[in-house]
Image: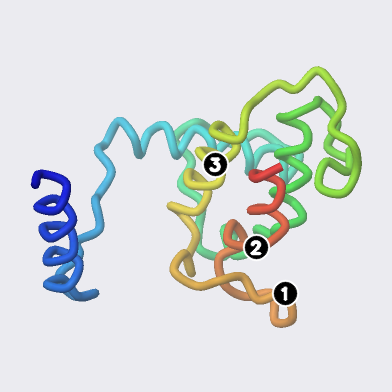
Amino acid sequence: DTNNHRRHCLFDFIMSTNDEDVSVKTPKASQINRYQRVLHEYMEHNHSRAFPLNYQFSEDELSTVTPESILKWMNKKICGDADADMLHGDIPTPIRCSHHVLDFYKKSISYFMPNKGQVWDPETKRGNPTRAKDINNLIKK
């Protein structure tokens, strides 16, 4: 039967691949440009200053990004108030974006993080801040 065949094909595929076989899809230039615009907007908010559109953020500048600053920026994007407690409080209206948009923002910022493969460690303040639990919880909310 067709469904059985599909299950077996999927099982065979999963069993035949290992971490070394799985290739990471590299975004196209147009996608990277969209990511850069999001990062640029976030960094302007985070540093309270304007940057030239073609500005390339250094690893040192990117390493100052924290989950808390990303949450504040996302709160501002959602409801216009960076100090709103969207994670623990009630979600005010109007909502200006969906969880899909927040997930795209997270992915855009993450693309440029120096330690993007590492989970955020709140104790040492190291790793990828977009992978912090609070950010994922806000997106799910």
Left or right for 46, reference 89: left
> Label 3 vs label 1: CA separation?
21 Å
Quadrant of the rendered structure where residue 120 is? bottom right
Q: Which mark is residue 81?
A: none
Q: Give the labeled residue for mark 3.
A: 103
Left or right for 87, reference 28: right
Between 3 and 90, the residue placed more toward the observer is 3
Q: Earlier in the sequence, mark 3 or mark 1?
A: 3
Q: Is residue 107 above or below residue 97?
A: below
Amino acid type shown at disc 3: Asp
Amino acid type shown at disc 1: Pro
Q: Residue furthest bottom?
A: 124
Q: Is residue 49 above or below residue 22?
A: above
Q: Give the labeled residue for mark 2.
A: 132
> Is the C-beta separation of discs 3 and 2 under 8 Å?
no
Q: Residues within 10 Å of mark 3 (few under 14, many from 20)?
A: some
Amino acid type shown at disc 2: Ala
Task: Point out residue 58 in the picture as x, y percentages from the top left corner.
Answer: 50, 58
Q: Earlier in the sequence, mark 3 or mark 2?
A: 3
Report helix, strand or loop for mark 3. Answer: helix
Give the number of callouts.
Answer: 3
Instruction: Write the residue at 54% across / 33% down.
Output: 100
Instruction: Write the residue at 48% across / 47% down.
Output: 107
Between 82 and 43, the residue placed more toward the observer is 82
> Is the C-beta separation of discs 2 and 1 under 8 Å?
yes
> Label 2 vs label 1: CA separation?
8 Å
Q: Give the labeled residue for mark 1.
A: 122
Instruction: Write the residue at 16% across / 71% down.
Output: 17
